[in-house]
Amino acid sequence: MKKTVIISTLLIILLMLGIPAAINWFSPAKISGSGTVVSLYLHRENKIVNIPLEDYLVGVVAAEMPAAFPMEALKAQAVAARTYVLKRMGAGELVNPVYPGADVSDDSRQCQAWISSEEMKKRWGTLGFYENYLKIKRAVNATKGDIIIYQGEIIDPVYHSSCGGAGTENAADVWRFDIPYLKAVECPYDADPEPKRTVLLTPEKVREVLQLKQEALPVTAGSNKLPAIEVVDKTSTGRPKTVQVNGEMISAVTLRDYLGLRSTNFRLLPGPGGLTVETVGYGHGVGMCQYGVKGLALKGRDYREILKHYYTGVEIIKQE
């Protein structure tokens, strides 16, 4: 018993003292020389920092996918994140008044999310940080150089949290641009533990939101009634595509943004108390479904199979 306690104590000491040094020593800045550097705009601090690519990817995977997901899922996320940032870096300097001179932002509303090591420690605690950081770093290192291409060109590997098991969407149905590798595919193993949500929006809230938005949809001032809202067109997967609001046509994506809904896969139920909205999944539904990735990984699929499932007709190559 005493021997077990001594060994456990030594392991904890090594964990607290040895792993930080290991992390610092084996970081991409140490092992990859100059390499590719990402210019990242930190929107809360309003500044641009330069980070080695592989370090940046650890921060993205940590922000975009739960560290508890299977290793193959984390690898798939790492490759998608690497492809995403290199696609944007290859397009040249972004013409963006918010972050001129940066390759990407850490704001998930504009680019893929990213968090620092300090933020990871706040979220996971000290011991959780070391465990999760090293797990994510292994996923990034195991896929180093891997990117996704379609017909020789690097793709735009968009992804979302959960399709709710409904399958993914055609890009053309959501953004009106037909992208050959962003086609609707089945997602039979979406592992989202709570894909369905219901919210009740008061008539006042609905009118306020719709009147304040740029398109200024016609809503009768002073009325206590809901505007007339109905889905008039659906996508190939059965999600709302076009919605009519008091005679005006808007996309379901726009309505989702206006009302702050979790998904474009929604059901509108007007009633005397307001507008009840039932949603399934989380996100725009195009490209890689992260909870679907988890489900496929749990079924034994490796990260290459997973990525080729969600991005139609692509190849995964190693960029030196």
Image (tube, rainbow, N blue to C red):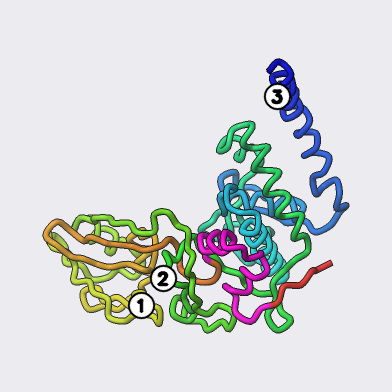
User: Is 83 rendered above or below residue 127?
Assistant: below
Residue marked by disc 2: 166
What is the crowding at mark 3: few (fewer than 14 residues within 10 Å), some, or many (at least 20)? few
Q: Which label sits on residue 238?
A: 1
Within the magenta stretch, is there residue 298?
Answer: yes
The answer to whether the residue labelled 1 contacts the one labelled 2, judged by CB atoms less than 8 Å apart, is: yes
Q: Amino acid at mark 2?
A: Ala
Residue lying farthest to the top in this orientation: 2
Q: Nearer the viewer, residue 235 or 185?
A: 185
Q: Residue 33 appears at what percent x and percent y?
A: 88, 52
Q: CA distance from mark 3 to mark 2?
A: 47 Å
Report, in whole angstroms, how far the alpha carbon at label 3 lies from the one at label 1: 55 Å
Give the residue number, with chain letter if any, for mark 3.
8
Indicate which disc, 1 or 2, sits on the residue closer to the N terminus.
Answer: 2
What is the magenta range? 289-314
Q: Please state the horizontal and vertical placement of residue 81, each as a whole percent of the image.
A: 65, 61
Q: Amino acid at mark 3?
A: Ser
Please say if 252 is above or below 135. below
Query: Is residue 262 part of the magenta span, yes or no?
Result: no
Can you say which quadrant of the picture contains the N terminus? top right
What is the crowding at mark 2: few (fewer than 14 residues within 10 Å), some, or many (at least 20)? many
The percent coordinates of residue 74 (x first, y second) are 63, 56
Image quadrant in which the C terminus is located: bottom right
Q: What type is the residue that disc 1 sits on?
A: Gly
